[in-house]
Amino acid sequence: MDDRKKSALIGYRYPIALIVLLVAGLLLAGRMVHLHISDREFLQEQGDARSVRTEPIPGYRGMIQDRNGEPLAVSTPVTTLWVNPKHFDASEEQLALLADAIQIPLPKLRARLKSAEGKGFIYLRRHMVPEDANRALALNISGVYGLPEYKRYYPAHEMAAHLIGFTNIDDQGQEGLELAFNEALKGEPGEKRVLKDRRGHVFRDLQILKEPQPGQNIQLTIDLKLQFMAYRELKAAVEQHGAKSGSVVLLDAESGDVLAMVNQPSYNPNDRSSLDLRALRNRALIDLFEPGSPIKPLTVAAAINSGHYKADDVVNTSPGYLRLGNQSIRDFRNYGAMDLTKIITKSSNVGVAKIALSMPIDTVWSFLQQLGLGQGTGIGFPGEAVGTLVAPREGQKAKIATMAYGYGLAVTSLQLAQAYQVLANHGLKKYVSLIKGGDRLPDEQILSASTANRVVEMMETVTLPGGTGTRAVIPGYRVAGKTGTVHKVGSTGYEYEYMAVFAGIAPVSDPKVVAVIWVDSPSGREYHGGEVAAPIFSRIMGNALRYLNVPPDNIAEGTNDDL
């Protein structure tokens, strides 16, 4: 082919190629326009299906606070790591780094992943500190993901554990108020749309679909400082006396608010790895005991309230014992004729038994029932014991007599504290409460103010020289109370183990605080209520009165005036 033909052929090829490229470009542009306009919705859906996901946003659990707003239970953000074994792909080096980041031995991690083959989801590590979890996620291992969650933390540790309780790993209440108010406390999760990369990791948040709703905060009547004071003193006393357990309840005498409630043994709700199940018991609300002598002032109050006795009436307790069928009721010694005040001072079983037997059979029982014994207190605590208060029948003289001095019935610490609150509050019963500002039943005037005040003055003699509770004295304050040394009931009847009890009120001139304290099975030579429980009362109540800025009502040096 000559040069002229070659040149002509080349001349034709150029425009042909140009036309072909132009047509191809037009076809491509047309296809792009077609896809952009006609198939846009379809393609958008297909792209979103591969990269856009909807994920939950956790709603944090509401706080539990003390009466002053101090936190008792809070939720902190954590990250849970999980893996989709079907998508998991890591080199040996990455696997070793992952095991180190989540603090799981490498062989154990390998075994867990191998056992999960074929599954679509397993947890790697729950509730990690976000910074530690981010170290693991930064390895960019296919199939490993992070899930934001919340973990419960309890700043008061073991001091308020029995009241607050705890949640499980899924943030659901399991014990205490966490369980009782679980529905109110738990948050409502939200939703968001996110963009993920090809490894499944979140690349960007796109849209909030539903805002998460936090749980409701709950404020208690508990004062954290008083809770700490009571816990410290009870723990020291239980250790000192080698006792099995103990409990303290403090009530506001005027409102019925529970100011403190502590128990021994306790536990740390933040670390339950070595938890003894016996330590879970809120003994102030669950453990029942025969109260013994602290019932005696209530029997005297019932007698005066019924109109069968006056405060200065005298009862002959000679010869120091009383036979009722095959049962004997005895005093420490023969006290002879005593007025009602001295019966309380000397803790005379015979005296209160004779008082109860001289009245209609249901007089004492009915009055104790009005005070709230043998009934739930209505605070809504899960597992709260009701107690036992059985009405005596005609002819059951021994039952009537023993009930008068605190045997044959069973109460909780809170029930006994509520009964003493009536005496402290001039005869007005305030239903106890753990929730600040919560609903309560209407107040009830159980006793006349004059009767209640007179019985409190009678109880003051228990803490004066000659009484059984002199170790309950608080310098600067007049104190009223009643000791108890209660035989414990075993499988074969009453045993040679005791509960040391003290129930008290202060200050006498204008009662502000009620306390009930018991210590179970103190060992050693000291086991009476006046030796074990009364000193605890003195320390706790003294601290409480000073903390609450209650003015002293006994500034005469070393004495209690104005009997």
Image (cartoon, rainbow, N blue to C red):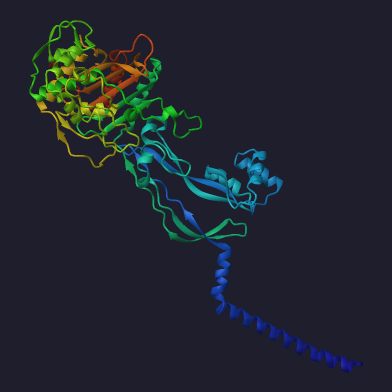
Name which residue lies at 24% across and 42% down. 439
Determine whether 184 is above or below 229 in the image: below
Rendering quarter of residue 202: bottom right
Compare residues 201 and 399 and report the one nearer the observer: 399
Residue 110 is situated, as x and y percent measured from the top left of the image, at: 67, 43
User: What count of labels does the image hold?
Assistant: 0
Determine whether 377 is above or below 214 in the image: above
Compare residues 298 and 547 and report the one nearer the observer: 298
Residue 289 is situated, as x and y percent measured from the top left of the image, at: 31, 23
The C terminus, quarter of image: top left
Residue 312 is situated, as x and y percent measured from the top left of the image, at: 8, 15
Name which residue lies at 21% across and 5% down. 333
Rendering quarter of residue 484: top left
Name which residue lies at 33% across and 18% down. 488
Residue lying at the far right in this picture: please name it.
1
Determine whether 327 is above or below 21 in the image: above
Q: Is residue 419 left or right of residue 522?
A: left
Residue 548 can be seen in this image? no
Compare residues 286 and 479 and report the one nearer the observer: 286
Residue 1 is situated, as x and y percent measured from the top left of the image, at: 92, 92
Q: Is residue 449 left or right of residue 421?
A: left
Residue 305 can be seen in this image? yes
Rendering quarter of residue 422: top left
